[in-house]
């Protein structure tokens, strides 16, 4: 049985990755799952300098999901390379580093520093809804996305994945902009902007007021967007949004994703990633599927 | 440290201690590894409520293999837990967080143990583990002084508890003990100590921090924040620290994994 997939020349032992921001750099969940079994670890977003993130409360539960407004707290690229990358190197899994920034120059600085490392791919976060400057400003206008993608492609030594925001009118317009600017792949969806109000206190639950929604409740939306993008661009797609089970992952593959990522469900069930890996194999076995590519994009 | 894991625990029994306050005993292998001040995350069965609820450990009995959790019904998840009965199974994740550093209280010291509201329960296991002289102050809203008898027993050598001491009570409405909060009870009873351990609402912990600084004594305070993962990955439950913390490289420690207990001078609350 073949579960290997290739994205921009990088081969993954299976199509299961972690959603950026839900898995740290793997240290915490390494206590629960064998990181060697994952297709890739996609790290929490990292910027050129340490970011303190947003005030608390940063998380809130909503029906079938959660809101977060962490604000991309991160220790900065230098600490990240020294500590987190050194940790991840011990494992037989691909490493995809999620990169965030406030300006194009910030992104390029991180991308250039990572060029000297052996990370496998870069995922560019232009879709975080929880920081006011940069980030999402690049991800909600096609021309801005085209510009930043071009700048990053010029600076990057590794293949570039652009992570798209679902908080747009037409996701395919963004996918096409990324593709035409030279992106090697796209990943989607980032979180959907939402709010929760504490009716007793008459206040927003999150200190940031708005947060990004994730969890099983968003899966149909994510799946629809992956399917739309799969019909709009030729570059590979990494699909994510509410994946809780192998069956959810198979839906994303069938909709056209070459790989999938488990996000918020890591918080709910810390074993989810490996359960999805095992479950995809079990599904293939059950249906006599020799190659995972038979599933990818089979539902048009 | 023992490996964290998610496992199905079995309900031994559950009873209401006061309106909205429940006392749940679970049989679980995790009981072997628990120490005072740590917590577990308990999963609701209702899949619309996905995230596990962090609940402090009130008592751990490694011999019986049981954990006692005393919690307040705060919403849908804890509301579901209040319906658990003997024999039910419930998933828990643990053991989480770092506990109270009992080794900081030397045998010749007097330790002041402060619990406010739903911060009272974790103080019980601490009281049982500390072998020095203990002054325990429990603050309540009203006359519903849950766990008071357990504290009385813990300072008189009962319940396998070590050491001796005294128990004081404060109630906001003045119906029992000192009228006011734990700080009012300290003043009214002229309680002196060499070290403080505390768990309770943020205003109480701020007052404890200020008091400890004035007295020039260490205070170990247990903080609370809304959490998602409970294991240090999501960065949801951070608190401001006075120095750059080694994990985040900004002034943010994770309450779930770097805490929930911090030396008061380390945090900016």
Image (cartoon, grey):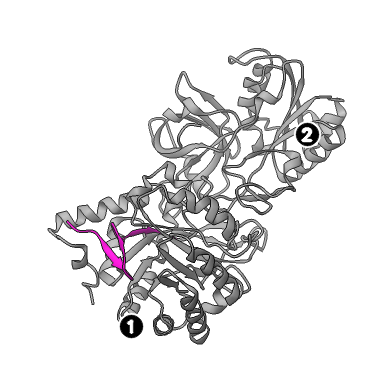
Which residue is at a point 44% across and 51% down the rendered structure image?
A88
Residue A112 picture location, percent across and down:
52, 69
Q: Which mark is residue A21?
A: none
Which residue is at a point 36% across and 67% down the rendered structure image?
A239
How many other residues sit within 10 Å of disc 1, few (<14), some (14-19) or many (≥20)?
Answer: some
Q: Is residue B115 visible?
A: no
Rendered view: B182 above or below A56: above
> Label 2 is found on which chain of the structure?
B
Residue at the front extreme of this rendering:
A116
Residue at the left extreme of this rendering:
A288
> Under tag 1, what secondary structure?
loop
How many other residues sit within 10 Å of disc 2, few (<14), some (14-19) or many (≥20)?
Answer: many
Q: Is residue A210 left or right of residue A92?
A: right
Residue A10 lies in the magenta-colored region: yes
Q: Is residue A249 visible?
A: yes
Residue B131 lies in the magenta-colored region: no
Residue A270 picture location, percent across and down:
41, 47
Residue A202 picture location, percent across and down:
67, 63
Q: Is residue B142 left or right of residue B126?
A: right
Q: What quarter of the picture does the C terminus of chain A occupy?
A: bottom left
Q: Which residues are magenta?
A: A1-19
Which residue is at a point 33% across and 57% down the rendered structure image?
A39
Where is residue B159, by image quadrant? Answer: top right
Residue at the top extreme of this rendering:
B157
Q: Name the residue beneath numbered marker 1.
A: A232
Foreground: B55 or A6?
A6
> Label 1 is found on which chain of the structure?
A
Rendered view: A143 above or below A161: below
Q: Name the residue beneath numbered marker 2.
A: B182
């Amino acid at each position: 049985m073949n579960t290997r997939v290739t994205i921009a020349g990088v081969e993954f032992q299976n199509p299961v990755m972690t959603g950026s921001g839900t898995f740290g750099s793997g240290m915490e969940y390494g206590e629960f799952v064998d990181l060697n079994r994952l297709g890739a670890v996609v790290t929490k977003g990292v910027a050129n300098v340490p970011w303190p993130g947003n005030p608390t409360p940063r998380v809130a539960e909503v029906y079938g999901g959660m809101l977060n407004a962490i604000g991309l707290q991160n220790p900065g690229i230098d600490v990240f390379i020294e500590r987190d990358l050194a940790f991840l190197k011990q494992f037989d899994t691909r490493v995809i580093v999620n990169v965030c920034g406030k300006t194009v120059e910030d992104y390029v600085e991180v991308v250039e520093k990572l060029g000297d490392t052996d990370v496998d791919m870069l995922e560019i976060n232009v879709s975080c809804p929880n920081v006011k400057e940069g980030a999402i400003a690049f991800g909600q206008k096609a021309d801005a996305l085209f510009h930043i993608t071009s700048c990053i492609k010029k600076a990057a030594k590794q293949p570039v994945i652009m992570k798209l925001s679902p908080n747009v009118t037409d996701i395919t317009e963004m996918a096409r902009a990324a593709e035409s600017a030279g992106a090697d792949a796209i990943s989607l969806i980032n979180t959907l902007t939402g709010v929760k109000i504490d009716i007793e206190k008459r206040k927003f639950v999150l200190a940031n007021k708005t947060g990004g929604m994730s969890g099983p409740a968003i899966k149909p939306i994510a799946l629809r967007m992956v399917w739309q993008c799969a019909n709009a661009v030729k570059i590979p797609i990494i699909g994510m949004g509410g994946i809780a089970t192998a069956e959810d992952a198979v839906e994303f593959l069938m909709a056209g994703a070459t790989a999938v990522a488990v996000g918020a469900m890591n918080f709910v069930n810390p074993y989810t990633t490996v359960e999805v890996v095992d479950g995809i194999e079990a599904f293939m076995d059950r249906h006599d599927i020799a190659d995972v590519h038979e599933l990818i994009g089979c539902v048009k | 440290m023992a490996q964290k894991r998610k496992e199905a625990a079995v309900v031994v029994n559950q009873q209401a201690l006061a309106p909205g306050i429940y006392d749940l005993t679970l049989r679980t292998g995790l009981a072997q590894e628990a120490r005072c001040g740590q917590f577990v995350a308990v999963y609701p069965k209702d899949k619309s409520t996905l995230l596990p609820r962090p609940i402090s450990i009130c008592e751990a009995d490694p011999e019986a293999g049981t954990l006692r959790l005393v919690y307040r019904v705060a919403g849908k998840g804890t509301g579901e837990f209040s319906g658990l009965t003997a024999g039910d199974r419930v998933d828990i994740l643990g053991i989480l967080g770092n506990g109270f550093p009992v080794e900081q209280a030397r045998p010749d010291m007097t330790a002041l143990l402060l619990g406010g509201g739903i911060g009272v329960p974790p103080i019980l296991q601490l009281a049982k583990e500390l072998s020095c002289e203990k002054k325990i102050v429990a603050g309540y809203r009203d006359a519903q002084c849950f766990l008071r008898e357990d504290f009385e027993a813990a300072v008189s050598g009962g319940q396998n508890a070590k050491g001796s001491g005294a128990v004081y009570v404060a109630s906001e409405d003045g119906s029992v003990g000192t009228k006011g909060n734990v700080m009012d009870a300290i003043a009214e009873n002229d309680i002196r100590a060499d070290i403080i351990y505390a768990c309770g609402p943020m205003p109480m912990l701020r007052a404890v921090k200020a008091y400890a600084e004035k007295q020039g004594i260490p205070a170990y305070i247990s903080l609370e924040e809304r959490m998602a993962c409970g294991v240090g990955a999501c960065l949801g439950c951070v608190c401001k620290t006075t120095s750059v913390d080694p994990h985040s490289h900004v002034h943010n420690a994770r309450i779930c994994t770097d805490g929930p207990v911090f030396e008061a001078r380390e945090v900016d609350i």
